[in-house]
Amino acid sequence: MDQDTGWSDYEAGATLGGMGSQGGIVVRDEGYRGNLRLTYEADEERSFHSITCGIAGWLRHPRFFYTADEATRAFEAMKPALEELGAKLTEGGPRSTADGQAAGPLLAAFIVRFS
């Protein structure tokens, strides 16, 4: 848990050690204020490392890495960017077509930055 930033173990760590959405074992899973999430999965036998970031109702974006060091650095780098993006979006997803249209460029910029 990272008490300084508000990020904490997702579901009190219940997801750790389980199978992740990208086919690896969840080795780190953190949430922020109930609507942001970062999940790190690994499978050392395949040199597989992935991070899936999410904003409830808006975004689910996986990234893939060759090494644990790369993935760990990216995990930490994505936290403030995800917080910043989440603060600009309507909680829970778009409430109107206009909400969705306004968010499009913000979401696209985040995905391009973290691809």
Image: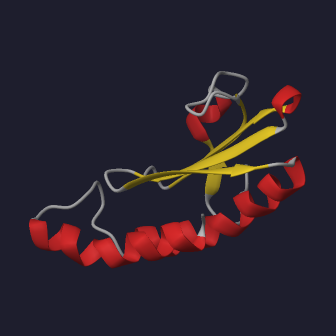
Report x, y in % for residue 76: 73, 63
Report x, y in % for residue 73: 81, 62
Report x, y in % for residue 96: 10, 65
Q: Look at the image and name its color scheme.
A: secondary structure
Front in this rendered view, residue 19 or 33: 19
Q: In this view, does 58 lie above or below 13?
A: below
Residue at 29% across, 54% down: 92
Residue at 69% across, 44% down: 50
Is residue 11 visible in the rendered image? The answer is yes
Front in this rendered view, residue 16 or 104: 104
Q: Is residue 20 above or below residue 107?
A: above
> Is 46 displayed left or right of 84 in the figure?
right
Front in this rendered view, residue 39 or 4: 39
Residue at 87% across, 31% down: 44
Front in this rendered view, residue 42 or 38: 42
Picture mark count: 0
Is residue 87 visible in the rendered image? The answer is no
Residue at 82% across, 30% down: 46
Q: In this view, does 10 lie above or below 21?
A: below
Quadrant into which the C terminus falls:
bottom right
Hey, which quadrant is residue 59 in on the image?
bottom left
Report x, y in % for residue 10: 59, 39
Hey, which quadrant is residue 19 in on the image?
top right
The residue most toward the top is: 18
